[in-house]
Amino acid sequence: MRRVLALLALAAGPVLVLGVLFVLPVGGMLSEGFVVDGRFAPGAVLDVLARPRVHRVAWFTLWSSAVATALAVLLGLPAAYALHRLRLPGRHAVRAALLVPFVLPTVVVGVAFRQLLGEGGPLGFLGLDGTPVAIVAGLVFFNVAVVVRTVGVAWESLDPRPGQAAAALGASPWQVLRTVTLPALRPAVVGAASVVFLFCATAFGIVLTLGGVRYSTVETEIYLLTTTVFDLQAAAALSVLQIVVVVVLLAVSARLRAVPDPTAQRTVVAARPLRRGDVPVVLATLVVLGAMLAPVAALVAGSLSVGDGWGLANYRALSSAGDGQALLVPVSDALLMSLRTAVDATWMALLLGGLVSVVVTRRSRSAAERRVRSALDGFFMLPLGVSAVTLGFGFLITLDRPPLDLRDSPLLVPLAQALVALPLVVRTLTPVLAGVDDRQRQAAASLGASPWRAVLTVDLPVVWKPALAASGFAFAASLGEFGATSFLARDDSPTLPVVIFRLIGHPGEMNYGMALAASVVLAATTAVVMLAVERLRVPGVGAF
């Protein structure tokens, strides 16, 4: 009983924070759909879901996410093998380069694809700008890194001896891959595919930038209903639908990703030298790398294009408010605001995520403790099931009155960004803490060490590098967060992704050039952070 009480005391802080900043806003959002004129009216939700446009939006969300997921898996598997099992020159840099698209601000990804596929772009002759193909391409670009990272981590810790035994018995490389390797990797592949599908189904900035009003997913439809049509009840009904679907998919994903013993010692196999038979895989990886770099290259080239020549005029204009006073503040001020809010969101996410990881990874010694820990684990994972748009909308309608009137608080945006980044921190720290042998903590305690001293001497030496990597993930994700921030950022203190979206919406060549230059600055910042994160990666542990 003392351990259960200690567990509850340790979890009290994270539970209170999530209760106030997550359950309350999401609950307020749900009440908008189910409560009409002060009465519980679930029929209103069904009326909204019966609309023909809702059916079209749901169908587009489903098929575009499914196609993008299939393409991301097909493109990501060869790169996962080449970058985690082969000793290639510069593979750390290539891994980091492929990871950058995942943390690029979604608005930046949308701008990059418009620059690549739009009229006058390098691939403008294909006529794909503003089509579903462009949206699917953007989703694949954004999510290939998930497959490379998740499957690659599983691949580099895969025991090579069964495959070597099959080859010694006369199996061809294709037979070894089909009968030995792929079955062993199936949980990782299925888990990565399910996560990619979730990311595609809840994509916001990419679809909003490339699809506009014509091609909406459930996520962008919620935004448009809220900010353009002001139909809060319909937006709430779609949020209810999205939450139900995403939570079910998360439950299925968690079951598929489960491993028999998550605390088992992992063995990382050393990468082997390149052989002649690996050439097709390496070429496929180079093709994926080229496809990932093409939109970024088009973005950089567009930012340097001025009239009929080249120059830095678009970058120098970042200190202005744009053509026709498109903005209330200069872009440079928005960049400083983004950096400031990202720093605040990072320490919040790291503090909360660290506590959550400690709570869910300690070994249970009784059935009661196991049940309490399992319930807490499920509660802490709830933010994974709610989109940033729903969270931002919930903040807007619930945290606007005493005692939680945060409308004018500078912490409102960092708090929302911290909740969005929280799953990345937990997913990075939890596998590492779960791998620490509990007997070391017990030995430290038997020698007289206090619980805090045991943490400092046993856990900290193992977790400090992953903690820095988690900080990098949280910082990059917060820096580019757009879904929740688009609701919460004030006009006089916007973040950089919000400013980029506003510049795109204002006519004028100068405004578009500034949007490109600002996107490059944001992309470069996240790329530098991701290079540092890749250096801190613990081999064989953690997908994200």
Image (cartoon, rainbow, N blue to C red):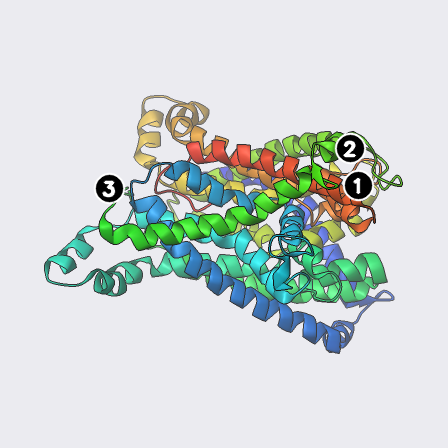
Q: Residue at x 25, y 44 (%)?
A: 274
The front one of 417 and 73 is: 73
Q: Which residue is mark 3?
A: 273
Q: Residue at x 87, y 66 (%)?
A: 37
Q: Position of residue 260 (x, y in %)?
A: 32, 55
Q: Are marks 2 and 1 in contact (CB under 8 Å)?
A: yes
Q: Earlier in the sequence, mark 2 or mark 1?
A: 2
Judge depth for marks 1 and 3 and give the one in front.
Answer: 1
Q: Which mark is residue 336?
A: none
The front one of 242 and 473 is: 473
- The image shows residue 424, relative to residue 31, as above or below, that is above
Mark 1 Cα-neighbour bin, 10 Å: few <14, some 14–19, many ≥20: some
Q: Is residue 327 left or right of residue 308?
A: right
Q: CA distance from mark 2 to mark 1?
A: 8 Å
- The image shows residue 207, relative to residue 6, as above or below, that is below
Q: CA distance from mark 1 to mark 3?
A: 50 Å
Q: Which mark is residue 510?
A: 1
Quarter of the image where one finds residue 323: top right
Q: Is residue 518 left or right of residue 258?
A: right
Mark 2 Cα-neighbour bin, 10 Å: few <14, some 14–19, many ≥20: many
Q: Secondary structure at mark 2?
A: helix
Q: Position of residue 202 (x, y in %)?
A: 62, 58
Q: Which residue is mark 2?
A: 317
Q: Earlier in the sequence, mark 3 or mark 2?
A: 3
Q: Secondary structure at mark 1?
A: helix
Q: Are marks 3 and 2 in contact (CB under 8 Å)?
A: no
